[in-house]
Image (tube, helix red, strand yellow):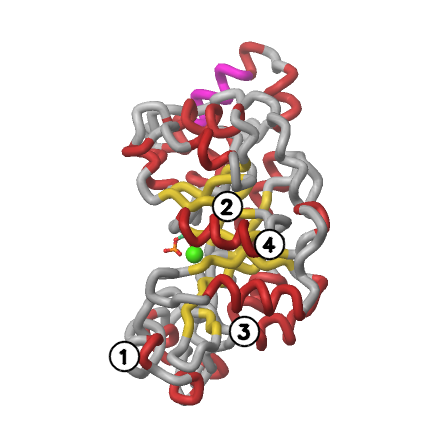
Amino acid sequence: MENLFFSRKQIREGMDMKKFVTYLAMSAAVMGGASQIGTVQADAAEGEADLPFPDERMLNISHRGASGYAPEHTIAAYELGVEKKGDYIEVDLQMTKDGELIAMHDETVDRTTDGTGRVGEMTLEEIKQLDAGTWFNEQNPEMAKPEYAGLEVPTLREIFEHFGKSKHYYIETKSPDVYPGMEEKLNELLEEYKLTGVNGRSSNVIIQSFSQESLLKMNEINPDLPLVQLISRPDQEGTSRLDEIAEYAIGVGPSFSRIKQMEGGADYISKVREKGLLIHPYTVNTEEDMLLAMQWGITGVFTNYPDRFRQMLKDYNH
Ligand code: G3P
Ligand code: CA
């Protein structure tokens, strides 16, 4: 079978028409009937240079670490993210009763540990007693490893201590309305570990949130931080907020499954790019979705399988 992948350069510069038609047909087969495919993406608009990576590089963000292989938001999952060639470690933040920033997706510890309760009503000492790995072994026997049992919930400080300044972090302020002061604490830690730069290019972090208020607060505290606005319903809000977002953020992180449900998903992505915004959809896990995302001209993905996306990028940009 002819190689399914064409480089973005080939697509931009125009390929042989017969080859291109074959490519679209094969893409359609791979996509299982997805309605919008093979869209040629316009060149990036200005603004994309605000990243510590070359403009052409599609970012591979290890979602909650390489969470397809190890219990999410543990040092083990983050290590695997690095090992499997993710560019960024994604960290969701919650804050304990005694004001410690910890890595956890949910507001309660129930789903990802052996305990119960709200993070905001527990001390760090209490959180540290919990087992953050056994649930994964039980739910994913094919990925289970004895060393995952008993893993701790890491603090953000421990993550920075462990991985240092040579790694890149994509940090989400979760439920900021529940945790007043979260943004200030985050910025203090970033500065202590010297992870912010004078501009996006020299920064080791990107800050993301569904909360515009939280991002604006981060921007006020430290205007040099590169920010990404997460969007849960791009299908509902369309492009209506993009101009406003471009005032404070370098990009958007929309739900990929919602983009796929849109009438003009490819069009939406083109419009985001025309505004000079990066687009990092979540969560892109299958090869089919990765291929579609690349064809649509995304500039990065959140994925539980950074090794899979790395391989797809290699094939696509051969
Ligand atoms: O931060 C991008 C993506 O992770 C948002 O969804 O629920 O996985 O934090 P969630
Ligand atoms: Ca997240």
First in sequence: mark 2 vs mark 4 = 4
| Residue depicted at x 31% and y 80% | 121
Q: Mark 3 against mark 4, which lies toward the viewer?
A: 4
As rendered, which of 183 and 240 lies closer to the eye?
A: 183
Secondary structure category for the residue under label 2: strand
Classify 10 Å Cα crowding around label 4: few (below 14), some (14-19), many (20 and above): some
Image: magenta residue range: 20-27
Residue under label 2, please give it: 228
* Residue 26 falls within the magenta-colored stretch: yes
Residue type for callout 3: Ile
First in sequence: mark 3 vs mark 2 = 3
Ligand 2, by image quadrant, is bottom left
Residue type for callout 2: Val
Residue under label 3, please give it: 75
| Residue depicted at x 54% and y 50% | 219
State whether residue 1 appears in this view.
no
What is the CA distance from the residue labelled 1 to the residue labelled 3? 22 Å
Q: Is residue 290 left or right of residue 233?
A: right
First in sequence: mark 1 vs mark 3 = 3
